[in-house]
Amino acid sequence: MAISKEEALKYHSKWKPGKLEVLSSKPCSIADELSLAYTPGVAEPCRVIHKNIDEVYNYTIKGNLVAVISDGTAVLGLGDIGPEAGKPVMEGKGVLFKRFADIDVFDIELGTKVPREVIKTVQYLEPTFGGINLEDIKAPECFEIEEELIRTMEIPVFHDDQHGTAIISSAAIMNAIEIVGKKMDQVKIVISGAGAAGTACAKMYLQLGVKRENIYMFDIGGLLHKQRGDIDKYREMFARDYEEYHTLAEALVGADVFVGVSAGNLVSQDMVRSMAPKPVVFAMANPDPEIKYEDAKAARKDVIVATGRSDYPNQVNNVLGFPFIFRGALDVRATKINEEMKMAASIALANLAKEKVIPFVIKAYGGKKFSFGPDYIIPKPFDPRVLYNVAPAVAKAAMDTGVALKPISDWDKYAKELRERLTFSREIAEAVVDKFSMRFDKKPFFKKAEKKKTIAKKVTPKSVNKNIKKKNTAKPKKVVKRKVARKVKSKK
């Protein structure tokens, strides 16, 4: 469904400006409830937490609260538009966290671009949040910021522009390479975009078995090579010894895979035709891909195409990752999101795409049927099984690698909790849709809202339950001990 400028502006401005609000999870309508919510009753949990800081997870929202933090320097494909202009994106991120994984969010837009100031500010927020989602911070500053925060904080820190894209595209590329019958250690990959997403994707592809010498990375200055003199330490591992190709078109000749995380309309049909037999094209720039889906498919019949858009098949979108990765991390109180947890999420997504698509998903997408193949290499965001598969996989990986402070012992109970969370978030979504529509002339905001509302209904098909991970008999590694000190650790 095409969205007009007028519809987008109306959606964000009518009723209440913006997309988020704070609602009380406890009643406060009579005097006794007021006394419990605030003074004098509120003093009791304060005393308990003061004696044992870990009790903050039992008496406050911290364990289910994520900060979405941005400085507005790399917002979507809009660039450095500032923190205020980036706020609608951060609010939107909060909506997705809640809708898909029942995670609460405060969006925080910072009025500084200085990495050390960003780092210090986020460090001071650790007592409030259970996790940190960094968003739309430009490279190379984003690498320094995330690296230092991971090192000094004891809650998970995750830069979604880097790792979200890498995780989802890795799941898609695993399935695409399998479909075309090639091997990871033999494919030639050309990447357009050497920023946060491009660099993280390349690193994760190495974990999949792709050889470093088979990766060619381009940025606005051309091919990354050591003679350029402008390659920072975060990208130098992908710099070639010399300028083997002068243009992107030259590099794509005979290439097996193209990964675009750069800008629209950089790839022509002739460039696609020049690629190896059965090529894979991931044109993920938003909103305009490096080559339009229909143009790539028209160039040759044997190509597998993915984009970042929801109106084409194979949407490689971060919404398939961050809500569910944080869900699993928060549920075991992970101290970080490590490489094993990221890979577990990617593998879970890749495997889910091979399973039979349930009726709920077909209904959510207007009756269109999907099956594993060139036009379905990655699950759909509204598939509830994404939560049921990815969150447990991430949680288990956290336990296996010793970063889980609260290991899961009853996987059946955890599966039930995930189902209840998704049902609850759907109820909220349905209530908001009804409330929103009533404010607008008592009719649905979108012309096709009736179809959209089916997404918010309570639907937990029996076929979903069998896909939820059952009891885990594997013994987790030794759990790391939580440090009680509130002070931010200083760099040694």
Image: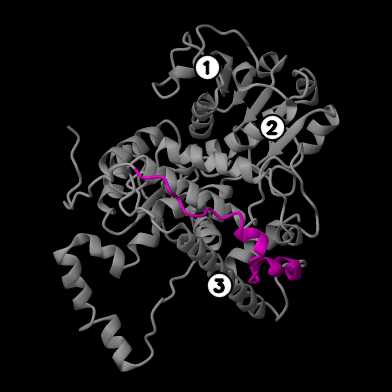
Badge number at residue 263? none
Q: Residue at x 66, y 47 (%)?
A: 379
The quarter of the picture where the C terminus appears is top left
Badge number at residue 212? 1
Sort mark 3 into few (<14), some (14-19) or many (20+) by Cα contacts within 10 Å: some
Q: Are marks 2 and 1 in contact (CB under 8 Å)?
A: no
Q: Residue at x 71, y 62 (%)?
A: 360
Q: Which residue is mark 3?
A: 428
Question: N-terminal of the two: label 3 or label 1?
Answer: 1
Q: Residue furthest front?
A: 473
Sort mark 2 into few (<14), some (14-19) or many (20+) by Cα contacts within 10 Å: many
Q: Amino acid at mark 1?
A: Arg
> In front here: 448 or 182?
182
Q: Magenta span covers which residues?
A: 449-476
Q: Residue furthest bottom?
A: 31
Q: Residue at x 83, y 27 (%)?
A: 299
Badge number at residue 176? 2
Q: Amino acid at mark 2?
A: Ala
Q: CA distance from mark 3 to mark 2?
A: 36 Å
Does residue 82 appear anywhere in the picture?
no
* Coloring scheme used: one colour
Residue 63, picture quadrant: bottom left
Question: In the image, is 43 to the left or to the right of 83?
Answer: left
> In front here: 330 or 250?
330
> In front here: 61 or 398?
398
The quarter of the picture where the N terminus appears is bottom right
Q: Secondary structure at mark 1?
A: helix
Question: In the image, is 1 to the left or to the right of 321?
Answer: right
Q: CA distance from mark 2 to mark 1?
A: 19 Å
Across and down, in percent, residue 72 comes to 45, 46
